[in-house]
Amino acid sequence: MHIVAIDGPAGSGKSSVSRAVAKQLRFGYLDTGAAYRALTWAVLAGELEVSTQSSEEIAENFAYSISLDPEDYWVRVGNSDLTYEIRLASVGQAVSEFASLPQVRQYMHWLTHNLISTSSLPGIVVEGRDITTVVFPEAKTRILLTASEEVRLERRSAELPEGTSIADQVTKRDQIDSRVVDFRVPAPGVHLVDSTELDFDSTVEAIIALVAKD
Ligand code: CDP
């Protein structure tokens, strides 16, 4: 299976670009951030406890599922569809705290490998913060997608409901996240794609060109 690993900070366009790349290549698409968000939602709802649990206990108590189809995106915990709930500001504000727990990261590592190994896709685009470095350092194509802070904040503010604080949603989250994994500088062998000056289609094309070469 051709694994395309894409990391980058919030607002770099990672999710929309990764999904478009997957569609064009007829690959699967896996948004790893959705699991961190769904886990946070479950903890905030009182349905899951993670701080005192091991990664194995989290796996037993968290019935997570996600679509790998770039044309049909959904996220579920048990029978509840959480596709929209995981984007709530309350989840965005709390997610980095839980994402910094080692047992949560260990569980996510296992989950990501498990979701992919049980699929029969020709390839998959996996996006997140630590995919090129920790989760799939052996991926055939590894990319760090960045953009200047100014452009990232502009792109993210276009996506958020009015009145939501961008500083809370993006800047603070990036600061906390970057203490846990470095997603600002490409690791050796990782391609850097800077989308500051690129529009959406050119960014997708640049990534497809790298996949074709690898
Ligand atoms: O879309 P955006 O980049 O803003 O965030 P996301 O991909 O939905 O990820 C939400 C949060 O999950 C991040 O702020 C990180 O705290 C965490 N995360 C992580 O630690 N490692 C990953 N591979 C993916 C997400």
Image (cartoon, grey):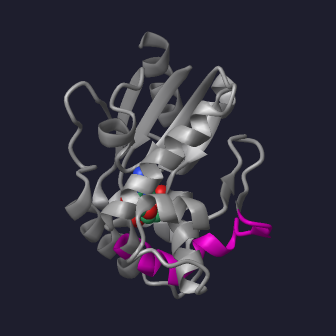
> What x and y, as percent, mark residue 74?
73, 56
The reply to whether residue 200 is in sight is no
> What x and y, as percent, mark residue 23?
68, 32
Q: Residue at x 36, y 55 (%)?
A: 9
Q: Is residue 122 above or below residue 66?
A: above
Q: Residue at x 29, y 54 (%)?
A: 148
Q: Residue furthest top?
A: 213
Ligand 1 is located in which of the four quadrants? bottom left
Image quadrant containing the N terminus: top right
Magenta-colored span? 77-97
**Residue 87 falls left or right of residue 93:** right
> What x and y, as percent, mark residue 112?
51, 44
**Residue 54 falls left or right of residue 62:** left
Q: Residue at x 54, y 85 (%)?
A: 44
Image quadrant of residue 118? Answer: top right
> What x and y, as percent, mark residue 161?
59, 79
Decide which of 168, 199 is in the foreground and name it. 168
The reply to whether residue 45 is in sight is yes
Q: Residue at x 38, y 66 (%)?
A: 99
Q: Is residue 34 magenta?
A: no
Image quadrant of residue 160? Answer: bottom right
Image quadrant containing the C terminus: top left
Q: Is residue 90 magenta?
A: yes
Image quadrant of residue 119? Answer: top right
Decide which of 153, 139 is in the foreground and name it. 139
Decide which of 131, 72 is in the foreground and name it. 131
Q: What count of labels does the image hold?
A: 0
